[in-house]
Amino acid sequence: MWDPVVNQSTLRTQHNTRSAQNNAAVRCSPGNYRGWMYFKVVFPPGYNPPTASANGLGQEVSLSC
């Protein structure tokens, strides 16, 4: 079962880069949390496949404020 979403970052588009990052910070509230991410890559014309995507769920961490 999925945990409820605390906050979601805005969509960011990066061009011609090896890495990207984003931030969905909120005020500290004690509890157990984990992050989730999704990405999609659009390759240059002529590449096969033309796109790829994946997602991942981070380890759960406990926060005390």
Image: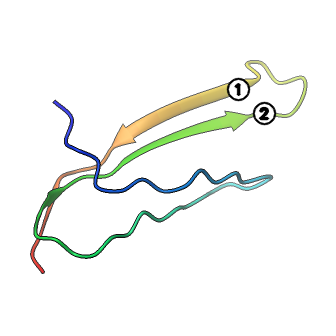
| Occupied quadrant, residue 29 | bottom left
Q: How crowded is mark 1: few (under 14 residues within 10 Å), some or many (20 or more)?
A: few
Q: In this view, does 45 lie to the left or right of 43?
A: right
Quarter of the picture holding the N terminus: top left
Give the colouring mode of the picture: rainbow
Q: Among all residues in the image, which is located at the extreme top?
A: 48
Q: Which mark is residue 35?
A: none
Q: Among all residues in the image, which is located at the extreme right?
A: 45
* Inter-mark Cα distance, 1 to 2: 6 Å
| Occupied quadrant, residue 18 | bottom right
Residue at the location (61% across, 58% down)?
Answer: 20
Q: In this view, does 22 lie above or below 5?
A: below
Quarter of the picture holding the C terminus: bottom left
Residue at the location (28% across, 75% down)?
Answer: 27
Q: Among all residues in the image, which is located at the extreme bottom?
A: 65
Secondary structure beneath label 1: strand
**Do labels 1 and 2 touch, CB within 8 Å?**
yes
Q: Quick one: label 1 or label 2, which is nearer the N terminus? A: 2
x then y, percent, for residue 33: 19, 56
